[in-house]
Image (tube, grey):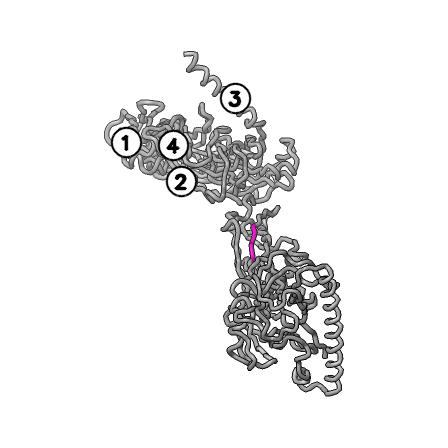
C-alpha cells in the first residue's frame, strides 16, 4: 500500500506545483450596458491586473470566451483597454434571468496564466410590455355579485428590474375596476373586480382597455382589449388538483412526448362545468418547446429541447370554465442532461514553425477542450499519439500545453501531423479529434558535404584558357539558403604562382576551369583546395582536395646537342684510315623535353656520302663503321642524321655529321670544299692556321715522346677522341627529372687509342676502340692510363720506338 500511495502522492505534489506556477490569478469584474456599439471601452484590464502594455503584447494577451460561441470583448494590446467586439442584447443572451453575466478568460502565455473576467450586462429599457393575447375574452354571468373577481393574464416585458412592468391601468367604466397584487415569486397578479352588477338585458357586451406600463426612462407601455360577454348565472370557479406541477424530462426527447397533465374541476353542471386550459404566462422558448391540449390538459413536447440552452422551464397554466371563471397553476419542467455533445478542441495558441534546435520541454501550443454537457458527460480526457516527439501536459482547467519531448531534426522529419483526441466520460462516451500541422524550421546545422573525399582531374598541356577540367559537387541537407552551396578556391600558391592564376571555379555549379594554358615541361601536377560554403547564418563550410595532373603532349621537337647546329662553325670528326668494321667513330646526342614515349628518340641516317660505309644505332645514336675503310673511300664523308621521337604525330630534327678519313693533317686537301664556297683569302688564312696548330701539336707530341723515352716507359699512343660538349649547348630547361629522358647520355665521353709504329702509314692502323679513361685534361697534361688495356694487344713492327699521335678533333671557325 505504501508503494502504491507514494507515486500518487508525488503526482499530486507535481500537479500542485504546476498549478502554482500556471494557476488562475485574480478575478476582474466589469459592467456594461447592453446594445453598446463596437469599440466601446468597458474598462482598462491592464491597469486592473497590474500588467503593463509591453507585457501584454509580449505574452500574447487575448480574450477567450468560456462556453460562449461569440467573443463579445476584445483587448487592445496597445492600451490594455477592454472593448466591445459584438453588440450584446441582454434579452437574447440571458432571456428572463434577473442577472445577466458573461464570463471570459484573459489568457497570457510564457508562462501560461489565466484571469477570470466577469462582465455584467446591464439592462436598458429597449422592450415594451406585451400581453400574451391581443384580446382577452371574458364571459361573466349577470348574476355575479358585486366584488366578484375575474383573473386576467398579465403583460410580459423582456426587460428586467425597473425596466420591467411596474403598473397597470384600466380604462374607466361603470362596472369594473382593476386589482393588482404580488405573488410569492414577485410576479404581479391581475384581477378584474366587478364593481356594479351586470344586467344582460341592458348590455350584453362590454369592451375595456387594459394598459401595462414599465418603469423605464422614458417609460414604455403595452395595451390589450378586454371583451366581456354577459351570460346567465355561473357561480363556481375551476380548481386545479395541484398548486404546482413538476416533471423531469430528458433533453432531446422526441416531439409528441407527454410531459405531464394538468387537471382542474368545476362543480357547475353542463357547459358551466366544462374546463379549458391555456398558457397564461409562458416564455417564448417554452412556447416553442411545449404545447398544451386545451381540453385534456396534456403538455407535450412540441420542439427541440436542449439542456444546454435551458435546463428549467416555468409555465403558468390557466383553467377556465364555460362562463369565463378561471384559475391558474404553475408547471415546472426540469430537463436532465444527456451526453449529446461531443468534446470540442480549440487551438488557442500555436507556434506552427518550431525551430529544430528547440530543447525538449519547449511549449509550442495551448489547447482548450470544452464539452457543453454537465457532470461526467462534460469531463474530457485529451491525448495525442505516441509516435511523435510531443506530449500534452494538463495545465489550468480544461487547458493543455503542447510540448516537445525530444530533439527535433528537420533533415529527418520536416513536418508533423499531430492528432489530438478528446474523449468525454459519458455513457456511451463521445470523442472528437483535431489534427495540428507543425513545420520544423530549419537551422543551419549541417555543413556542405562533398560527394567524394577527393577529386582527381587530368588535362592535356597546351589547353585553351577556359577549358573545363572537372566539376565538384557538394550537398547540404539544410533548407533554402541554409542548403544553398557556393564554391570557391582556397587561396594559396603552386610553385610561387597564385592558384587563382591557374584555375577558376564557378561559384554556383562547382565547374573548375583552366585560367591559362599549361605546359607539362614546367608543371606536371599540383593540388588545390576547394571550399564549399552555405548561405546560412553563420555559414558553414567544408573543403576537398583536387589533384590536377597535366598530361604530356608531343609538342617539343628533339634538340640535337652534338654535333652543334650548323651556324657559323663546322664540327668535323677525323677518322683514322685503319678503323675496322663496327668501330665507333662518333655519336649524335639529342634530347627531347617531352616525357614518356614522346621522348623516346630514334636515330636514322637519311643521306650519306657512302651509304654502305657508316651505320647509326637506332636508340643510341652511335655512328659506327659497317666495314673496313679502303683506299677507295673518299676522304670527306658527310652524314645527314634524322632524330625522331615516338609521339603521335612524331616530331624530328636533322643534323649533318662531317667526317674526315685521314691519319694526319698533311694529307688533308684544300679546305675550301669544306667551307662551302668561302673566299680564297679566307681559305689561305685557315690553311696557315691549321698548319701552325698542327706544327705546334706535333712539337708538343715530340716533347712528350722524348720524356717518355727518357723514362724508358713502354710507348703508348693515346688517341683521345673525347667529345667535350660546351655547357652553352645545353638548354637551361633540359633536366631529366624522372630518368625517362635522353639527357643521361650527354655526359658520356668517347676516347680513342691509336697504336702506330714509327714511319707507319695508314695501312699500319690496326683498330679504334672506345674507352673512358686516360683522357687529356684541359691543361694538356696527359693522365696516366690504366695498367690494363680494355682494348687488348696490337701488332708492333718496332717495339723500341712508338710514335704518339693525338690528332682527332679540330674546330674550324668561320
Whether residue 776 is visible to the viewer of this picture, yes or no, is yes
Q: Are marks 4 and 3 in contact (CB under 8 Å)?
A: no
Q: Which residues are magenta?
A: 544-548
**Mark 1 or 3: the one toward you:** 3
- Earlier residue among tags 2 and 4: 2
**Residue bearing the label numbered 2:** 207
Whether residue 309 is visible to the viewer of this picture, yes or no, is no
In the image, 377 versus 776, the foreground residue is 776
**Residue bearing the label numbered 4:** 423
- Percent of width and height locating residue 327: 35, 28
Residue appearing at x 66%, y 80% in the figure:
668
**Mark 4 or 1: the one toward you:** 4
- Percent of width and height locating residue 328: 36, 28
- Earlier residue among tags 4 and 1: 1
**Residue bearing the label numbered 1:** 258
Q: CA distance from mark 2 to mark 4?
A: 63 Å
Question: Is disc 1 placed on a helix, strand or loop?
Answer: strand
Amino acid at each position: 500500500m505504501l508503494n502504491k500511495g507514494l507515486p500518487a502522492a508525488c503526482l499530486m505534489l507535481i500537479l500542485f506545483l504546476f498549478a502554482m506556477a500556471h494557476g488562475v490569478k485574480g478575478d476582474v469584474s466589469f459592467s456594461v450596458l447592453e446594445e453598446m456599439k463596437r469599440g466601446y471601452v468597458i474598462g482598462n484590464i491592464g491597469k486592473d491586473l497590474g500588467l503593463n502594455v509591453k507585457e501584454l503584447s509580449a505574452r500574447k494577451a487575448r480574450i477567450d470566451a468560456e462556453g460562449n460561441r461569440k467573443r463579445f470583448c476584445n483587448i487592445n494590446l496597445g492600451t490594455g483597454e477592454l472593448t466591445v467586439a459584438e453588440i450584446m442584447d441582454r434579452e437574447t443572451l440571458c432571456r428572463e434571468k434577473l442577472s445577466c453575466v458573461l464570463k471570459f478568460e484573459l489568457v497570457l502565455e510564457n508562462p501560461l496564466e489565466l484571469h477570470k473576467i466577469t462582465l455584467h450586462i446591464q439592462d436598458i429599457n429597449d422592450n415594451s410590455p406585451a400581453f400574451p393575447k391581443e384580446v382577452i375574452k371574458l364571459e361573466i354571468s349577470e348574476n355575479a355579485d358585486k366584488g366578484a373577481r375575474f383573473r386576467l393574464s398579465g403583460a410580459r416585458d423582456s426587460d428586467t428590474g425597473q425596466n420591467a412592468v411596474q403598473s397597470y391601468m384600466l380604462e374607466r367604466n361603470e362596472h369594473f375596476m382593476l386589482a393588482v397584487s404580488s405573488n410569492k415569486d414577485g410576479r404581479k397578479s391581475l384581477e378584474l373586480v366587478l364593481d356594479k352588477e351586470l344586467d344582460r338585458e341592458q348590455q350584453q357586451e362590454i369592451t375595456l382597455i387594459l394598459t401595462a406600463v414599465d418603469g423605464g426612462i422614458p417609460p414604455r407601455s403595452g395595451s390589450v382589449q378586454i371583451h366581456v360577454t354577459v351570460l346567465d348565472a355561473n357561480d363556481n370557479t375551476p380548481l386545479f388538483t395541484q398548486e404546482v406541477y413538476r416533471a423531469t424530462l430528458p433533453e432531446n426527447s422526441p416531439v409528441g412526448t407527454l410531459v405531464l397533465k394538468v387537471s382542474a374541476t368545476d362543480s357547475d353542471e353542463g357547459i358551466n362545468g366544462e374546463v379549458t386550459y391555456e398558457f397564461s404566462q409562458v416564455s417564448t422558448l417554452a412556447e416553442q418547446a411545449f404545447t398544451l391540449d386545451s381540453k385534456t390538459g396534456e403538455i407535450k413536447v412540441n420542439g427541440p429541447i436542449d439542456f444546454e440552452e435551458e435546463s428549467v422551464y416555468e409555465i403558468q397554466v390557466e383553467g377556465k370554465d364555460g362562463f369565463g371563471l378561471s384559475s391558474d397553476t404553475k408547471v415546472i419542467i426540469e430537463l436532465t442532461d444527456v451526453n449529446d455533445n461531443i468534446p470540442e478542441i480549440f487551438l488557442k495558441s500555436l507556434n506552427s514553425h518550431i525551430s529544430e534546435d528547440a530543447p525538449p520541454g519547449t511549449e509550442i501550443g495551448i489547447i482548450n477542450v470544452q464539452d457543453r454537457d454537465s457532470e461526467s458527460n462534460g469531463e474530457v480526457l485529451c491525448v495525442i499519439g505516441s509516435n511523435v516527439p510531443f506530449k500534452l501536459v494538463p495545465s489550468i482547467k480544461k487547458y493543455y500545453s503542447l510540448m516537445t519531448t525530444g530533439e527535433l531534426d528537420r533533415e529527418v522529419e520536416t513536418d508533423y501531423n499531430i492528432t489530438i483526441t478528446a474523449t468525454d466520460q459519458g455513457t456511451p462516451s463521445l470523442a472528437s479529434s483535431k489534427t495540428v500541422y507543425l513545420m520544423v524550421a530549419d537551422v543551419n546545422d549541417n555543413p556542405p558535404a562533398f560527394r567524394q573525399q577527393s577529386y582527381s582531374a587530368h588535362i592535356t598541356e597546351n589547353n585553351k584558357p577556359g577549358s573545363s577540367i572537372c566539376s565538384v559537387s557538394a550537398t547540404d541537407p539544410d533548407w533554402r539558403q541554409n542548403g544553398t552551396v557556393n564554391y570557391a578556391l582556397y587561396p594559396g600558391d603552386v610553385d610561387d604562382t597564385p592558384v587563382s592564376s591557374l584555375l577558376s571555379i564557378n561559384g554556383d555549379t562547382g565547374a573548375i576551369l583552366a585560367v591559362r594554358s599549361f605546359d607539362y615541361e614546367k608543371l606536371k601536377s599540383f593540388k588545390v583546395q576547394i571550399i564549399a560554403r552555405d548561405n546560412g547564418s553563420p555559414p558553414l563550410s567544408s573543403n576537398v582536395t583536387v589533384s590536377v595532373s597535366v598530361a604530356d603532349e608531343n609538342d617539343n621537337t628533339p634538340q640535337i646537342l652534338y654535333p652543334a647546329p650548323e651556324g657559323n662553325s663546322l664540327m668535323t670528326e677525323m677518322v683514322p684510315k685503319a678503323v675496322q668494321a663496327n668501330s665507333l667513330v662518333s655519336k649524335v646526342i639529342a634530347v627531347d623535353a617531352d616525357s614518356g614515349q614522346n621522348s623516346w628518340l630514334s636515330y636514322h641516317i637519311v643521306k650519306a656520302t657512302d651509304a654502305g660505309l657508316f651505320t647509326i644505332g637506332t636508340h643510341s645514336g652511335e655512328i659506327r663503321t659497317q666495314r673496313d675503310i679502303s683506299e677507295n673511300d673518299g676522304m670527306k664523308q658527310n652524314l645527314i642524321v634524322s632524330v625522331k621521337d615516338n609521339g603521335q604525330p612524331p616530331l624530328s630534327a636533322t643534323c649533318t655529321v662531317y667526317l674526315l678519313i685521314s691519319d694526319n693533317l698533311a694529307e688533308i686537301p684544300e679546305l675550301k670544299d669544306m667551307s662551302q664556297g668561302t673566299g680564297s683569302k679566307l681559305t689561305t688564312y685557315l690553311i696557315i692556321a691549321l698548319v701552325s696548330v698542327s706544327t705546334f701539336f706535333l712539337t708538343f707530341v715530340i716533347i712528350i715522346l722524348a720524356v717518355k723515352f727518357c723514362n724508358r716507359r713502354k710507348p703508348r699512343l693515346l688517341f683521345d677522341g673525347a667529345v667535350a660538349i660546351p655547357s652553352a649547348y645545353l638548354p637551361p630547361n633540359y633536366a631529366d627529372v624522372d630518368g625517362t629522358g635522353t639527357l643521361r647520355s650527354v655526359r658520356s665521353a668517347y676516347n680513342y687509342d691509336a697504336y702506330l709504329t714509327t714511319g707507319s702509314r695508314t695501312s699500319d692502323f690496326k683498330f679504334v676502340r672506345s674507352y673512358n679513361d686516360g683522357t687529356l685534361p684541359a691543361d694538356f697534361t696527359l693522365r696516366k692510363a690504366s695498367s690494363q688495356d680494355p682494348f687488348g694487344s696490337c701488332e708492333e713492327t718496332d717495339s723500341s720506338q712508338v710514335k704518339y699521335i693525338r690528332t682527332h678533333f679540330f674546330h674550324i671557325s668561320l
